[in-house]
Amino acid sequence: MRLLDKSASEFLYQQVIEFVEKQEESGAIKAGDKLPSLRKLSSQFGISVPTVKQAYIELERQGTISARPQSGYYLKAKQARTLLPMRAKWASCKPVEVSCRSLIEQVYDAVHLPDTVALGISNPVNAHPPDKALARLMRSILTRVSEKAVSYGPVNGDAKLRLTLALRYQEQGVDVNHQDMVITNGAQEAISIALQCVAKRGDIVAVESPCYFGLIELIESLGMKAVEVYTCTEDGVCINELEKVLNQHPVKVCLFSTAINNPLGSMMTNEQRHALVKLLESRDIPLIEDEVYSDIYYTEQRPIPAQLYSEKGLVMTCSSFSKTAAPGYRVGWLIPGKFEEAAKRIKRAQSCSSPMLQQWTLTDYLLSGEYDRHLQVLRKTLRYNCERMRALIAEHFPKEVCISKPQGGSVLWIRCRSHVDTSQFFSQAIEQGVSFAPGQIFSPSGKYKNFMRISYGVKWCDTIEHSVMTLGKLVHEFSDK
Ligand SMILES: Cc1ncc(COP(=O)(O)O)c(C=O)c1O
């Protein structure tokens, strides 16, 4: 029997899990078989009974084995495994300067490669694009405004759009004044402005771990440092862990998806959001909330913005139409809290204003009621795609991979075996006509090498199934190495 490597960075209990998985793979144990007792395995490996128990509990939570009272643990029949919150101790991170640019560049480039199925980029709108409705509205606007369409717009954007958006927040109980809002070039510019309102070069920004790579790159380009905060696969940023990070490092600002995390698809509860704002405002630390996925929820109700709980004006809300209607229009917004003046100044200095034609089109889309009807279909389509994609991955990937169960958004986060580095087969996947996002670009400190993100924001067709099979073959190949 292979002995455990006590000097490895991998936890001992994870090595026990891998041992059980290998036994299953080699056929040494089969569905229905009883596993060695805790005592037997602990003495065979020379490790403690609680360590073996931790492994068995984890395998039970993953659905691989089941416990029978008074009898022991048994191997269950094969099924898709859900990625569960990590119970092992989270290794806390130091603030780091970020650098995984070349891989990020390749992921972006792959979106525009001909004959490549882009599963590496999160574009939910692909699943149900509203292009025809938007084109119709834009044509109608162009007949009304000719000269104005090519002029500069106001720095903070179209007043009617701001008013319409503010009303939507007010319906959720959030007191937003449209005069304070700034229309931006996508959520990315909103976040960039928000960061510059409260932090400068060298300052530390707390981010989720894992975190959307575009934000990591943004922090890098502003010369700031990132520190990662443990983020749960089910309910987002862990407040206790955040508190520890704040006690250890002079964090200047937190940048979190308070609704749906990309890539986890996890969602904070209202209580957590409230606790988060309370904690940060008690320490006078601003919160930048990234709300781009808030309208793509699979729960009963839209997640409430953290802005609702702000008493000191330290919460800045950033969002856009990129994930719901038209990423190419580049229309986003910022609710800047008490940083209104700075936000407008930075917007003016950075990009002067945002294109008006797209803003008018989206305003008409909202006011006509078509946007909300579109959202309903989009959410339904994505939810359906999500289940189909999970089933396909369970069928074609090695059985030990664990897959997230998102509560919204358009991506799956997949954990492969610990020795698999998904960036190593990225180029091969592209050569075979499919892209994905390797896990390591979702962490400033390069964690998640054995993870990958796959998008189900796609128009479903046979090619998608074929692409998942292609990726499955590569993961099999690299798992067996
Ligand atoms: C979590 C998250 N935040 C922000 C953005 C940027 O959004 P936008 O395209 O509106 O700039 C993205 C885009 O992928 C995202 O996934």
Image (cartoon, rainbow, N blue to C red):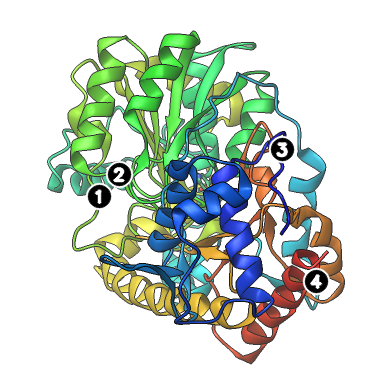
At label 1, which amino acid type do we have? Answer: Pro
Label 2 or label 4, whichever comes before in sequence order: 2
User: Where's residue 254, x and y in %?
Assistant: 43, 24
Which residue reaches farthest bottom?
A: 462
What is the CA distance from the residue labelled 4 to the residue labelled 3? 23 Å
What is the CA distance from the residue labelled 1 to the residue labelled 2? 8 Å
At label 4, which amino acid type do we have? Answer: Glu
The total number of labels drawn is 4
Residue at 25%, 32% in the rendered image: 307
Q: Are marks 3 and 1 in contact (CB under 8 Å)?
A: no
The residue labelled by disc 4 is 477
The residue labelled by disc 1 is 303
The residue labelled by disc 3 is 8
What is the CA distance from the residue labelled 3 to the residue labelled 2? 33 Å
The residue labelled by disc 2 is 268
User: Within 8 Å of ligand 1, the CB of disc 4?
Assistant: no
